[in-house]
Amino acid sequence: MDKNATRYNVQLYIYDLSRGMARSLSPIMLGKQLDGIWHTAIVAYGDEFFFGGEGISSCSPGGTMLGPPDTVVELGETEVSEEIFMEYLSSLGESTYRGDRYRLFEHNCNTFTNEVAQFLTGRPIPSYITDLPSEVLSTPFGQILRPILDSIHIAPPGGNVINGGRNI
C-alpha cells in the first residue's frame, strides 16, 4: 500500500426491517430465534449505497425511508478512489446487480454489500447477516413462505438509482 494514498472510511449500515418483531415472532413462526430481518448498505465517500428491486441506489447516509440505521459496523478503510468505485458500481449495475436480478433469498442487498465490502476493504460483512436466508429456508415455515417471499422486491424509498434499474 502507498503510504501517501488517500484513505476513505467504509461502514456497514444495518437496518432491521422487522423493527424488532423478528426477535419476538421468529421462535413461534420458525422454531428458532432470529434477531432481525436485515437490510444492509455500504457507506463510503459520503453516501449510502444499497441494492434492491430498482437496482443499485444511493442517498445521503440514513436518507432512505428507513431512517437512521439500527447498527453501524466499521468495516475499515479503502484506498479505492471514488471515481474507480463509481465505475465499479456502474459496471455492477449493468450486469450482476440490475434490478431485475434481485432475489430476496439468493441475490439481495446483503449479497451486494458483502461483495462491495470485499472490493473496498477485503473483508466480508458479518455472517449472521449473510446466513439469514438459509436460516429461514431451513425451517418448514420458511419453505411454505418461500413462494410468497420470492415475489418480494425490497427497494427502500429515498434513494437515487445509480444504474441498472429493470432495463437490460
Image (cartoon, rainbow, N blue to C red):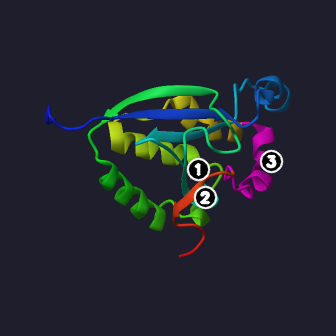
Quarter of the image where one finds residue 130 = top right
* Callout count: 3
Type of the residue with mark 2: Tyr
Residue 97: image location, x then y, percent: 51, 59
- 163 or 127, nearer to the observer: 163
- The answer to whether the residues at label 2 and label 1 have Cβ atoms under 8 Å apart is yes
**Quadrant assignment, res 64:** top right
Where residue 65 appears, as percent x and y from the top left, is 71, 44
Secondary-structure class at tag 2: loop
Disc 1 crowd, CA 10 A, few/some/many (<14, 14-19, 20+): many
Furthest toward the bottom, the residue is: 168
In the image, 82 versus 150, the foreground residue is 82
Identify the residue position indicated by label 1 in the image.
Answer: 108
What residue span does the magenta drawing correspond to?
139-156
- Residue receiving disc 2: 102
Task: Name the residue that disc number 3 marks.
Answer: 145
Q: Is residue 109 above or below residue 15?
A: below
SS of the residue under disc 1: loop
Three-letter amino acid code at the position of disc 3? Leu
For residue 82: magenta? Answer: no
The stretch drawn in magenta includes residue 144: yes
Q: Earlier in the sequence, mark 3 or mark 1?
A: 1
The residue type indicated by label 1 comes to Asn
